[in-house]
Image (cartoon, rainbow, N blue to C red):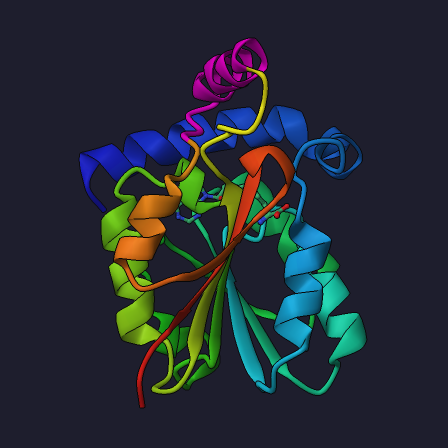
């Protein structure tokens, strides 16, 4: 673990220890697009999925309810969230690791057919490395799927500026759709360019 990662984990643990009890109730008011992402994911065939930064395990639980026969895993940097997700999703396999260098194949014993980032990449320090790493480790023919804050350019300027400043306090930096496009993503933007849904395929 690099000194940068160790410092990030200290920050995440402090932040999520405090936020964990109210996490699911509050996030439904601003982590938009997650249910749409889940519907999208379930519209394609796959039998193994790893969520990076699963948080409280909310998304994994919803996915597992609708596709119970699949294999599920999580890669989580924060101990505070890892504990919560593991208790909520006992059928999933977890790794305490960072998106930049997690060993995805070790989580389920096989390379996953889907790697899912839901409002996680915007918090990752070296996001380019994290995205490239996921694309290299997803199974051939598989997909990396991202839902996250987009560039907010469709919102009134003062609102977008205020939201950016508030997100920065929690080390969250919205994603530039152009950056995802440069990695070959197929994208859909949510209302006001608030969020982006992006699908990146690994060729067979
Ligand atoms: C905003 S929460 C999103 C949680 C969940 N995916 C959701 O949609 O509700 C971001 C999550 O990413 C995790 N995280 C942040 N940086 C990370 C990193 N570099 N590697 C892995 N997980 C990370 C945080 O600990 C947290 O659980």
Q: Position of residue 145 (x, y in %)?
A: 49, 63
State whether residue 14 is above or below residue 87. Answer: above
State whether residue 176 is above or below residue 95. Answer: above
- Report whether 96 appears left or right of 162: left
In the image, the segment drawn in magenta is 157-173
Report if residue 164 lies within the magenta region: yes
Residue in the picture at 25% in, 42% down: 126
User: 164 or 116, which is in the foreground?
Assistant: 164
Q: Position of residue 93 (x, y in %)?
A: 55, 71
Report if residue 46 lies within the magenta region: no
Please count the marks in the image. 0
User: 91 or 177, which is in the foreground?
Assistant: 177
- Report whether 201 appears left or right of 86: left
Q: Quadrant of residue 26?
A: top right
- Report whether 83 appears left or right of 200: right
Q: Position of residue 36 (x, y in %)?
A: 69, 57
Quadrant that contains the C terminus: bottom left
Residue in the picture at 39% in, 82% down: 111
């Amino acid at each position: 673990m690099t000194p940068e990662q160790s410092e990030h984990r200290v920050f995440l643990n402090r932040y999520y220890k405090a936020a964990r009890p109210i996490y699911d109730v509050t996030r439904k008011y601003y982590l938009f697009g997650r249910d749409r992402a889940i519907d999208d994911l379930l519209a394609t065939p796959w039998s193994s999925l790893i969520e990076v930064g699963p948080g409280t395990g909310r998304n994994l639980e919803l996915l597992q309810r609708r596709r119970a026969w699949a294999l599920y895993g999580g890669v989580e940097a924060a101990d505070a969230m890892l504990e919560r997700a593991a208790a909520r999703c006992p059928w999933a396999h977890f790794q305490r690791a960072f998106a930049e260098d997690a060993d995805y194949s070790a989580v389920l014993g096989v390379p996953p057919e889907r790697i899912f980032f839901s409002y996680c990449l915007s918090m990752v320090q070296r996001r380019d490395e994290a995205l490239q790493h996921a694309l290299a480790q997803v199974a051939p023919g598989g997909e990396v799927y991202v839902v996250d804050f987009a560039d907010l350019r469709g919102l009134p300027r003062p609102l977008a500026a205020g939201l950016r400043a508030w997100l920065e306090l929690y080390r969250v930096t919205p994603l530039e759709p152009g950056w995802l496009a440069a990695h070959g993503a197929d994208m859909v933007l949510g209302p006001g360019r608030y969020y982006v849904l992006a699908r990146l395929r690994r060729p067979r």
